[in-house]
Image (tube, rainbow, N blue to C red):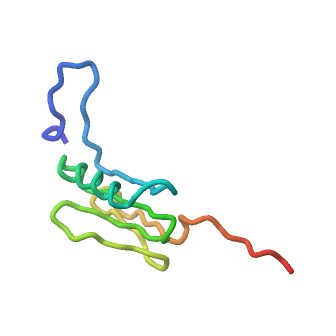
Amino acid sequence: MRDRLPRSVRYFATLVPDLVVEVKSQSDHLKKLREKIQIYLDQAVPVAILIDPDTCLLEVYRPDASVQTLGNGDILTVPELLPGWELVVEELWPVIFEDEK
């Protein structure tokens, strides 16, 4: 971590996070979010996750690795940062109740 902490003459440290999570809003464009994630990866962020509620998909990015796409039925894990932690992807989405007839 120290090698990723540049020296700064300012009062606040310039930090590179270990994990970045971007959630696409209705007005966001995936291309812009993916470009933003690439900037994080270029700055040595080890894991970045893009959550797209419109398609119910996650994209998991790691430097020097292909993008991992996860959907309902898949389990998100980040063993390099959170050993033993897991999340069932479909638990991210809101429950939709059908009208009773």
Residue visible at 28% across and 63% down in the picture: 61
Q: Is residue 58 left or right of residue 48?
A: right
Residue visible at 40% across and 58% down in the picture: 29
Looking at the picture, tell me which residue is in the foreground, 4 or 64.
Answer: 64
Position above or below: 80 against 6: below
Q: Is residue 88 left or right of residue 66?
A: right
Looking at the picture, tell me which residue is in the foreground, 62 or 3.
Answer: 62
**How many numbered marks does the figure carry?**
0
Position above or below: 88 against 41: below
Q: Position of residue 79 (x, y in %)?
A: 31, 63
The picture quadrant where one finds residue 12 is top left
The picture quadrant where one finds residue 48 is bottom left
The picture quadrant where one finds residue 5 is top left
Where the N terminus falls, by quadrant? top left
Q: Is residue 6 left or right of residue 19?
A: left
Q: Position of residue 20 (x, y in %)?
A: 34, 51
Looking at the picture, tell me which residue is in the foreground, 66 or 4.
Answer: 66
Q: Position of residue 40 (x, y in %)?
A: 25, 49
Taking the view exactly as shown, the residue that stands out farthest to the right is 101
Residue visible at 24% across and 32% down in the picture: 14
Q: Position of residue 45 (x, y in %)?
A: 24, 50
Residue visible at 86% across and 81% down in the picture: 101
